[in-house]
Amino acid sequence: MQPTDTSAVVEALRANDRFMVTSHDNPDGDALGSLLATHLALDALGKDSLMVLGGIAPLPGEYAFLELEARGLLRSAPTDARERVLVAVDCAQEGRIVEPTLIGVASLTVNIDHHHDNTRFGDVDLVVDDASSTAEVLADVFAALGIDLTPAIAEALYTAVVTDTGRFQYSNTTPKALRLAAVLVEAGADPSKVFVEVYESTPFPKLKLLARALERATELAEGRIVVSELRREDFDAAGAEEPYSEGIIDHLRAVDGAELVALVRELPAGASSARKGSLRSHPDGVDVSAIARSFGGGGHKRAAGFSTDLGMDEITRRIVDAFQSANGDSPG
């Protein structure tokens, strides 16, 4: 991390008084935890802060305990957006901000992230691509600002770290991430509560949706690739809401011998694209962010996503071709 990067963010947060904090579409634990933690930290500094996530899709139920709605989450741009500084957390590209008007109207944009392919769309950018999570980056910013870690801030940050590291099992689990987790627990985060809320509070329709995805799973490239899809009929049959697909891909990545896994879901009518894909690879596997970028998406080297209007057969073909090319294999 360059010291001037943190200094620039600290100065921007200190020098301004009115903020709106946002994150990416289809928010995960790092996005939502970082969103809430930043909002609470700005409140602690005596700033006027709002949280904004555009769209009408419900938030993933496993993060309901963060009580974002009860804390004033807005689902559209505030009327005074032009008078506020935009703080985008965990968002690699401005196109993934669900309320796109925020970028164009904000008086200043601060971009805080850990994705290596972040486009640096902010007026002030702090991108630490070797951090375990955006929450880890924020913890350093909060420390530089002299913000005390209240139990609420600590629990939001802990939720972000534990989910983005896959419960401290992914390759981004560094000594720094583990030390941060200890600090957050000491500050009041409850690991048992977070575990139960995120991982052991599965709605039954989500379980049925998982069954659909597992039933459709296919092995390709001699078992080195696993691909599945979720169609609208699957959501309807399971009685599942859109966010229930979150986390399903982790069950696919557990398949023995799978080096790359993909889950493609059909989006509801009226969405900006027909399908959304998620990609994962093992620690020594291919850079799935490069594959995602070929579809116009992006993400981490081991976890990435994209949106597309292509059909499932063409998506699968391109994923397999990219995997084989990255491994020097002959197309087959």
Image: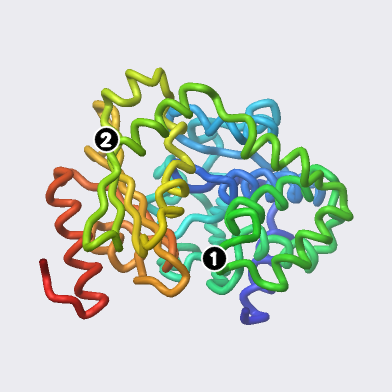
Task: Tell me the mark number nearer the camera, choosing from 2 and 1.
Answer: 2
Q: Quadrant of residue 240?
A: top left
In the picture of the structure, the residue carrying the numbered disc 1 is 114
Structural crowding at the residue carrying mark 2, measured as other residues with C-alpha within 10 Å and reported as few (<14), some (14–19) or many (≥20): many
Q: Decide: marks 2, 1 in contact (CB < 8 A)?
A: no
Image vertical order of residue 271 relative to residue 160, above or below: above
User: Given the image, on which type of amino acid does mark 1 rest?
Assistant: His
- Count of marks overlaid on the render: 2
Quadrant that contains the C terminus: bottom left
Q: Position of residue 53 (x, y in %)?
A: 51, 37
Measure how far apart labels 2 and 1 are at the Cα level: 28 Å
User: Given the image, on which type of amino acid does mark 2 rest?
Assistant: Glu
In the picture of the structure, the residue carrying the numbered disc 2 is 266
Image vertical order of residue 177 relative to residue 45, above or below: below
Q: Position of residue 310 (x, y in %)?
A: 15, 46
Q: Position of residue 126 (x, y in %)?
A: 57, 69
Q: Quadrant of residue 304?
A: bottom left
